[in-house]
Image (cartoon, coloured by chain):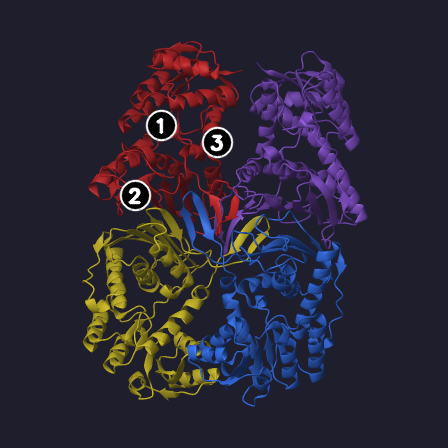
Chain colours: A yellow, B blue, C red, D purple
Amino acid sequence: MTLKLGVIGTGAIGQEHIRRCSKVLQGATVVAVSDINVDGARETLRRLDLQAEVYADGFEVINSPDVDAVLVTSWDPTHEAFTLAAVAAGKPVFCEKPLALSAEGCRRIVDAEIEHGKRLVQVGFMRPYDAGYRALKKVIVDGEIGEPLMLHCAHRNPTVPESYTTDMAITSTLIHELDVLRWLTDDDFKSVQVVYPRVTSKTHARLKDPQIVLFETQKGVRIDVEVFVNCAYGYDIQCEVVGENGIARLPEPSSVQLRKDARLSTSILTDWKDRFIDAYDVELQAFINDVHAGQLTGPSAWDGFAASVAADACLKAQNSGIIETVEMPPRPEFYNR
Amino acid sequence: MTLKLGVIGTGAIGQEHIRRCSKVLQGATVVAVSDINVDGARETLRRLDLQAEVYADGFEVINSPDVDAVLVTSWDPTHEAFTLAAVAAGKPVFCEKPLALSAEGCRRIVDAEIEHGKRLVQVGFMRPYDAGYRALKKVIVDGEIGEPLMLHCAHRNPTVPESYTTDMAITSTLIHELDVLRWLTDDDFKSVQVVYPRVTSKTHARLKDPQIVLFETQKGVRIDVEVFVNCAYGYDIQCEVVGENGIARLPEPSSVQLRKDARLSTSILTDWKDRFIDAYDVELQAFINDVHAGQLTGPSAWDGFAASVAADACLKAQNSGIIETVEMPPRPEFYNR
Amino acid sequence: MTLKLGVIGTGAIGQEHIRRCSKVLQGATVVAVSDINVDGARETLRRLDLQAEVYADGFEVINSPDVDAVLVTSWDPTHEAFTLAAVAAGKPVFCEKPLALSAEGCRRIVDAEIEHGKRLVQVGFMRPYDAGYRALKKVIVDGEIGEPLMLHCAHRNPTVPESYTTDMAITSTLIHELDVLRWLTDDDFKSVQVVYPRVTSKTHARLKDPQIVLFETQKGVRIDVEVFVNCAYGYDIQCEVVGENGIARLPEPSSVQLRKDARLSTSILTDWKDRFIDAYDVELQAFINDVHAGQLTGPSAWDGFAASVAADACLKAQNSGIIETVEMPPRPEFYNR
Amino acid sequence: MTLKLGVIGTGAIGQEHIRRCSKVLQGATVVAVSDINVDGARETLRRLDLQAEVYADGFEVINSPDVDAVLVTSWDPTHEAFTLAAVAAGKPVFCEKPLALSAEGCRRIVDAEIEHGKRLVQVGFMRPYDAGYRALKKVIVDGEIGEPLMLHCAHRNPTVPESYTTDMAITSTLIHELDVLRWLTDDDFKSVQVVYPRVTSKTHARLKDPQIVLFETQKGVRIDVEVFVNCAYGYDIQCEVVGENGIARLPEPSSVQLRKDARLSTSILTDWKDRFIDAYDVELQAFINDVHAGQLTGPSAWDGFAASVAADACLKAQNSGIIETVEMPPRPEFYNR
């Protein structure tokens, strides 16, 4: 039985997901799409040689009797309303990050989902589906390094556009660590502090770059994340977990080893799209499979809420310069893993 | 439009390919299967929850009007006949290695295919579909290391069963290098020599282990392949290409880096099935896509023939101890890439 | 012309330096030694088969007309007085760390040396003489990574004795980073903060382990140093310098690469004495050569003072939990490099 | 007590050894030198600010009553005569490679030494004193990889002068492997074969480059050595020992790890002088210490002879293209280690 998907928003990521669900993954088909630019939506279908109903309005997609489940890949400010509508319709919904523009918005989705009585929402955090992170988590869970005590992380981009500002280091970049680190350590953030190193000459006035974000978790683990979005040399995601008995480090992406020009080297990626490309496939296949199986297991509305709460505390810490508490309410029984 | 596949042989690899085509890949469905053990074939379908016609005879699969293309995953001695029948029926056929039991058998398939006038046969050599080998080939083709002059390779298994004998180092193990090295270097073997190092204490009387196989290619490239099937430490495939300007080495499989017990380490695989698991998916998806596109591009009957001719020369060299010529006829225009 | 050395203190490090200067290095000879345990001093000479005058009192060593230069390797509380006496005698003096028990004590030596009018004091910080740190500094100075913005460091010991307490993470362990990081970056500490991760189960009540020490330098560089003295897995010194154009990392000690037991690994040292063994030779040879050349260039009394000031701020930060200023007066012209 | 050295030949390597013995090492002093260019010898002493007797004739150096031991660093054709003279004079002699121009010449030295009744000769093979090779040997001797079965080696230079010809790949380059591999494996060569890969475009008519030299040892170990003296990318010495239980690889020279320009890299040396610079110091210090101790332990006249016999077989194999026997007589009891 094929899962009939409706996709709301046919921008870049929407197009990618439509292609993925139609041409790569198993068990689903795209039967309806919408976009505020209806011609763009049609063009996407035409280019991919797909048959699907085109709607001008996302809510029509959600409510179409043909649609079993919904992908929300629209403009960020619309995520909350579409996700809430899908929950109201009792349809599984995969919503790209951010789940909502505010923690309060995320909380409304959490509340609606709990009221519905069953998980319907998966947030588009793909790193837990990355083979490297999964291998790293396995090492931790298998007890190979003992209890984690510290994590040293880095999120580096070669460059960012002029429109990228200091706060986006949190909301656009660190947001991935805010989710994956909770998943990796099975822990929650307790407090956060942001410090600003000497700025690189490659940035501009509205972007302090790099930044270092320092967390303490509920279990007392200390996490430092270097966010450096004009690092020049590549797109490089680092994560090192220091445990009681040893240290485990996220795998480097596989690369041919070269001996050339007096250097022994492997390549570093430069485009973020290459780094987690496989993880997107795995993530959506998992969503499709989980819907078929009747039980979502991926990043939940609660995870989206938690990332949002943490991001708010980070933004506060960016401005205050002091240690800010991450005001995270206790996890509802509903979301216990 | 979905490609309707008939699968001949539902042993281990047959089951894997049925699962793959039905549950993982896009664009195909298994509509017919056969096995000398008809109950086994039925059980496979049941276990995978698939609907397909079950035949006692592979030729019925080939000739079923429902079947668009054929996968031959039966007992090795039957490969040639089934592949020839598929060609006679004008149906694309993916045949697991070996294409035939002898070079002459492979040649008969080549001749039949040429007579048919269009490529119909793909041989199940999966390494050209491995991401690592593809990256290595790209480095060569891009000219990053200049013209290749030498290749240093190794094929190591942790252990083999008692039934594995000296000749199987060629026919079961080296056979993969015999294909992938031709593909990697776009070259053909000219001569071969086999030397026997001191044997490991972990082998038995009928297996000389390790062996070193030394090739010269038509272009004069020298290739040494260490075949060591009781190497104890892991399943390890190495390939280093020494070019005029530098050296490129096959990527190591990705792994968490550990600092533990006074060692800084990454893991080495121990099961061959893990090493090329992704390549099998890519290989069969490529076959499906190529059939849809009307033009096969993967390992051809000619490649199967070439591997067989090279293997024969290796076997001769194993016994003679001298340099043996690889008697390879010129490539027919039909197979020019 | 051979430099005649007097060595005050024939404990472990004193014996090592006597052996080094007598049996390994060029251009010096040990002509006088002292120790509060005179018999121990005699035994050391006997064991090394050396002729030298033995004194009960270090000041006699300093004032012996036979002695050209002095090594102070005595009990820490005596360092200041002996070093001051050597300066008063106008004799070059190599004093093991700490230069004095307090920043004030170091400052008295600085003042005495300035008053003397010429550098006479070298402090026994050996890391600037380590080939790895020198290679790292060269990369920075050559501009290969652009301006340094952040340093991520770690100082890990496999285990420490029961007598090791929280403050010793600064005074016995971090003290090496306090010197070498100033040298490496040609910069001074401005502020420091200490955070305590979840403690390892391998520590005891009087030792919080691990600790993370966070610095800001005068130039705005951010430095984090993980100090983890029960890390279990090895003695491991890490230093990564993040610059505007790239990242440079301290070389790992050279090691045979092993493929064994399904791991690809190199060894990690477990004994700190092995890590910087060569640096001790280079350090003392440099002192001898510099005395011959009439101009000391190694770690100065000012460097000893700076490390002491920084250590005091770290100790304060350990207790306060807040960001503490490193109250470093401007560098006197006398010490400009 | 200082060893009084006479040095015959003050060319490049002679000057280096004079400097080394005078300025770096312990326990020796250069008291006499000779060179056919007497002015050059004087200039060397002047430049190094040394006092020593200058002779026009090397035999005068050997026979000077002031001289305890001799270093032969003269023109290759004179090595044999000077070494024989030193043996005749009963003086320890360190002779740079080659010990003699022919195996017969080496054998004459062996015979003279045996007749003298005690080892007096050390040949200047420095690789057994390299820390990396020593670590590799330790791994083997400690049984970490089980019995060695195969060695894969490479000797690569970035480039060579026009005067370098095919035979010099053996006599100037491989000669180091001919010694160190015997030492590493505690084994002797039994046969050798040379194969010529496609030549690099960077060579000239009188130099076939690269070459691969294939050995079988007395114990049945197979060794392949790639000799590639115009490899362009660096000076790179590789040695991988495949044992029954695992594989050990010669350490790469220590290097800062860089992340820059989309590459993660370490440096490869380009000048051979940098690669074994420390080994020269260790080698000569060992000679000095061994003379003091009354027992030479370094590469012996027998080792020089063995390397010469092996080189002759390699040269024969270069020309014949077939497998040539290494005609090595049994090791005299005198040289048993």
Residue designated by label 1: C97
Q: CA distance from mark 2 to mark 3?
A: 28 Å
Amino acid type, residue under disc 3 in the picture: Asp
Q: CA distance from mark 1 to mark 2?
A: 23 Å
Residue designated by label 2: C210
Q: Position of residue B156 (x, y in %)?
A: 57, 55
The N terminus of chain D is located in which quarter?
top right
Q: CA distance from mark 1 to mark 3?
A: 18 Å
Q: Please say if B157 is above or below C213.
A: below
Amino acid type, residue under disc 1 in the picture: Lys
Q: How many marks?
A: 3
Q: Please say if D300 is above or below D322.
A: above
The C terminus of chain D is located in which quarter?
top right
Residue designated by label 3: C278
Residue B308: which quarter of the image?
Answer: bottom right
Q: Chain of mark 1?
A: C
Q: Nearer the viewer, residue D270 or D196?
A: D196
Q: Chain of mark 3?
A: C
Of circles 1 and 3, which is in front?
Answer: 3
Q: Position of residue D271 (x, y in %)?
A: 62, 40
Q: Which mark is residue B212?
A: none
